[in-house]
Amino acid sequence: MFRSTSALLLAGALLMQAPLLVPAAHAQQNGGWFVPKSSQPADAPAPSRRRTAAPQPRPVPEPVPAAVPIQDEQQGDGQAQGPQVQPVLPLPPIPSLADLPKGSSPPPAVFGIISVPEVMHASSAAQQVEKVLGARRDKLNGDAQKEQAAWRESQQQIQAAAKGLTQEQVQTRVRALQARVQAAQKDFRNRNRIIQEAAQVAIGQIERELVQVIKQVSASHGMNFVLHREQVALNMPEFDITPQVVNQLNSTLPSVFIPADGVDSEVLAKSGTYPTTANPGPQPVIAAAAQASAAPPQAAARKK
């Protein structure tokens, strides 16, 4: 009896000191042994599970546009910094200038009005330039369209005959077509440049003569201040000298010198015998040489 009572007391003391076991379901939820509330810290973290989740990839930051100001990490409020103010630097003092001696006053202004676009439109020399060079541009455009049509036809022929040819034969024909295209494009660019330079030579003669005519007509009316009509909001017809300038320009310069078709103006200027309207002699010889040198490769091949 005494032994059984002592055994019970000893077992009760051991149970009070040892941690209590919990069922398997509670053990799985709590990750193992049950921890009493009295011995568990108030801010104890939750027990970690055996299976840990895979770390999520960090989002890639988007590039910051150049126009958006970048926030300063040291600022506590997180606001973006504004544009930096340039410092105001001191300037040296302005030097004092002495008065100049008295000069003569300008004469009273007598105004005149002119419309240069209207003068160029009514100029017989400008009409000649537009007619001659316009025909050359049309011819150049027609030749370019014909050559492009020939390129397309050659390309179709190569595609149609590609089945009965070897790869090397097809590549040979393609390279020949590419060489023809490059040579023709170079020739068209050269012809276009020559036309533009011829226009500069012809229009330059008209502009040079127009300045002299304006001085002549304005001086005949006692005008010393001529403005463009497009710059004036209101004027009287008596101020406009456009009709008189047109008549005088057509009288003094009815036509201008235009380099022949295919003649390079730069080559003509370097020859030392630059022709004029009164002396156009050496131009045809230079034109023939220039046309022969500017002939496209396919035309030279046909002559052979």
Image (tube, rainbow, N blue to C red):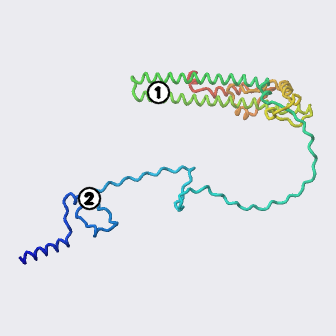
Residue 167 in the image: state x and y as whole percent.
40, 29
Disc 2 crowd, CA 10 A, few/some/many (<14, 14-19, 20+): few
Please give the label number shown on residue 173: 1
Tell me residue 222's x, y (percent): 92, 34
> 31 and 220: which one is in front?
31
The residue at the point 69 percent across, 23 percent down is 134
Amino acid type at mark 1: Arg
Judge by depth and name the residue closer to the eye, 140 or 220. Answer: 220
Q: Quadrant of the C terminus?
A: top right
**110 relative position to 191: left or right:** right
For badge 2, the amino acid type reads Arg
Which residue appears farthest toward the left when viewing the image?
1
In the image, 63 versus 113, the foreground residue is 63
| Of pointers 1 and 2, the one earlier in the residue sequence | 2
Left or right: 16 as drawn, with respect to 135: left
Q: Quadrant of residue 275?
A: top right
- Please tell me whether residue 73 is drawn above or below residue 172 in the rendered image: below
Give the spatial CA distance, label 1 vs label 2. 73 Å
Compared with 273, 23 (above or below) is below
Q: Secondary structure at mark 1?
A: helix
Left-right relation of 87 to 94: left
Quarter location, residue 183: top right
Image spot of residue 302 (x, y percent): 56, 21
Question: Which residue is painted at 40% across and 53% down in the image?
Answer: 58
Task: Report which residue position mark 2 lands on.
Answer: 50
Q: Is residue 260 above or below residue 76?
A: above
- Name the residue located 38 percent from the left edge and 52 percent from the top edge: 57
Question: Is 36 placed left or right of 297 in the picture?
Answer: left
